[in-house]
């Protein structure tokens, strides 16, 4: 079975770990969000790709969900001693090495997809990890801060500001001119199932869908497209998805997110058991829906979620 | 008193510490060797400039003589885990930050001299540290390895090979087209004394002299030019200077090094007490010479050497 997963960072990575456990023989391709990529200290940092790579490769800081296990921050402390920031972005020493290798390969002319493959040769994530695009796309968020309207990089909004101010707009800068990375459309065309994990529908999955050609390839794939709600009981399971959902005019409910994706894209949708009341609303929108436990508390619970998603795909297919 | 010092790495840096103690009110400009600069992991590394900066700024690993105190090597270990080397070059985590800041500023368009000034704003070395040139110069060494003639970067010769094979030629690649960095010729023109510390006469001081205009500015300065022998008892005090001296056809003796610089450049030369027998030979070459203790065993001994050099300068001037 060929499964394609559109993944953001922590939520996507954890779901993928469950999916691998649930479908150990599946051929899994991950289309990773690169809209949260940022250039820091002259280095190209790809937080979502790295979170997937480290999580599946056994190098992740489990508690935190991002960054490397057993991490230190010597380089960052020294950069701060030079007065060089930003200090709000937590780049650890082990993590720095990844960005140094990536930046060096990009400077040598390799596209991000080839660089990602090279990095994964070390981590052996057990999936094929593709960036959504080799072109530079950076999600910016329009905010009002101290009475001034301005646009900040998504990481600044998310990490420095912790989404504490309203997002007026979320723009994946560069997406319109971008092309899907090599292998992305092919993987979608050959997929048996396409999954949207409980990742942020705006700044993770939404950014991937903003790359011209990807949304169309999913809609045209002719295979079940199944999503898992990142909203449980009207609040994001983790992160601050409600802030960016508001910016695109979507309520923070499991049903509203399903309608946001729409029946043109989504065939099935899993909501948490506490949102069982939303099933009818989602089905009324033409999307098959089931209520099941959606908290990724451990690997078993996550694998069970993946199995439910695959079961719903079979139900859709039948 | 305005003193200009041509400095390599460890020997130059330690001498400078003694000079600052010996002449606390002097206005000291250091022209630093950049021929040992190397690009590693996409970063610009300037070992000699950094050794001077860290030593005078209190950040040096005292035992080792280079690199940062209390250093760790997490980034390097991770790079090695990616299969990215070279492993033979010891870049520590704290040190990495310096190279990241430097590389970022160079990429932003600042010349190396401005970058060095910015880095020194943190370290406050108490001297004005100028790279010999803002242009890229890299010392390469022609060797025979496994029966093949090839040229290696100086760092590869020095650090990887530990000068274990004969150097057939030492070439400061790029020097001919280089210009002295802003301030270098001005400092030489305004100097009261010019000093050659006990640095490597070929790959440290020699490389600085290879930048067109610097040798002439020293010869034309009309002020005492005093050197201290890096060779004591026919052997280098530290490092493997004999290997590169042989490549330029100079014997590893205190007198031969003085003659190599020549009376056209050098007015005075200090040899170690054990080389008192060389004084007559040096003076016969038209260079005033004194035999004094030249082992930089501690700050007092080093300050005493600096005082001897300044005393010899006064003697030459009188």
Image (cartoon, coloured by chain):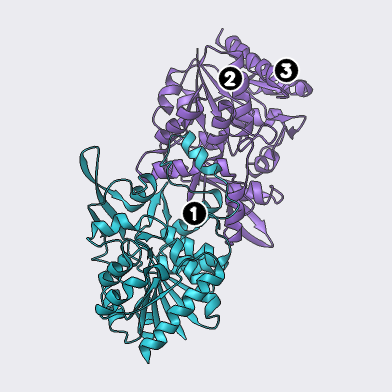
Chain colours: A cyan, B purple
Residue furthest to the top in view is: B318
Which of A39/A168 is in front?
Answer: A168
**Residue marked by disc 1:** A100
On screen, residue A57 versus residue A34, left or right, reads right
| Secondary element type, mark 2 | loop
Q: Which mark is residue B5?
A: none
- Chain assignment, label 3: B
Residue furthest to the bottom in view is: A318
Asked whether the beta carbons under mark 1 and mark 3 sit within 8 Å of each other, the answer is: no
Quarter of the image where the C terminus of chain A is located = bottom left
Estimate the x, y position of residue B248 in percent, counting from the top left.
Answer: 62, 42
| Secondary element type, mark 1 | helix
Comes first in the chain, label 3 or label 2: 2
On screen, residue A167 versus residue B216, left or right, reads left
Estimate the x, y position of residue B6 in percent, counting from the top left.
Answer: 54, 28
Which of A118/B143 is in front?
Answer: A118
**Residue marked by disc 3:** B292
Q: Are marks 1 and 3 on the same chain?
A: no
Q: Which mark is residue B267?
A: 2
**Marks 1/3: CA–CA distance:** 48 Å
- Chain assignment, label 2: B
Q: Quadrant of residue B228?
A: top right
- Chain assignment, label 1: A
Residue A127 appears in the picture as rendered: no
């Amino acid at each position: 079975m060929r499964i394609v997963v559109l993944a953001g960072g922590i939520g996507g990575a954890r779901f993928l770990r469950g999916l691998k456990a649930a479908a150990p023989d599946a051929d899994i391709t991950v289309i990773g969000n690169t809209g949260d990529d940022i250039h820091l200290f002259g280095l190209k940092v790809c937080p979502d790709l790295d979170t997937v790579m480290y999580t599946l490769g056994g190098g992740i800081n489990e508690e935190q969900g991002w960054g490397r296990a057993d991490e230190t921050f010597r380089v960052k402390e020294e950069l701060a001693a030079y007065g060089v920031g930003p200090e709000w972005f937590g780049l650890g020493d082990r993590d720095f090495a990844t960005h140094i290798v990536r930046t060096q390969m990009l400077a040598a002319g390799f596209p991000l997809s080839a660089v990602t493959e090279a990095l994964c040769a070390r981590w052996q994530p057990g999936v094929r990890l593709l960036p959504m695009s080799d072109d530079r796309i950076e999600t910016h968020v329009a905010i009002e801060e101290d009475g001034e309207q301005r646009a900040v990089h998504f990481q600044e909004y998310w990490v420095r500001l912790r989404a504490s101010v309203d997002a007026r707009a979320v723009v994946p800068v560069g997406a319109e001119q971008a092309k899907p990375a090599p292998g992305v459309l092919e993987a979608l065309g050959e997929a048996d199932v396409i999954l949207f994990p409980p990742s942020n529908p705006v700044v993770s999955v939404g950014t991937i869908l903003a790359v011209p050609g990807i949304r169309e390839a999913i809609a045209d794939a002719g295979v079940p497209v199944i999503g898992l709600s990142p909203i449980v009981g009207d609040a994001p399971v983790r992160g601050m998805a409600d802030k960016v959902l508001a910016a695109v005019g979507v309520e923070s409910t499991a049903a509203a997110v399903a309608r946001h994706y729409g029946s043109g894209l989504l065939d099935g949708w899993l909501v948490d058991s506490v949102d069982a009341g939303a099933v009818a609303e989602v089905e009324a929108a033409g999307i098959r829906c089931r209520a099941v436990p959606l908290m990724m508390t451990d690997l078993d619970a996550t694998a069970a979620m993946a199995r439910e998603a695959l079961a719903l795909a079979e139900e859709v297919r039948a």
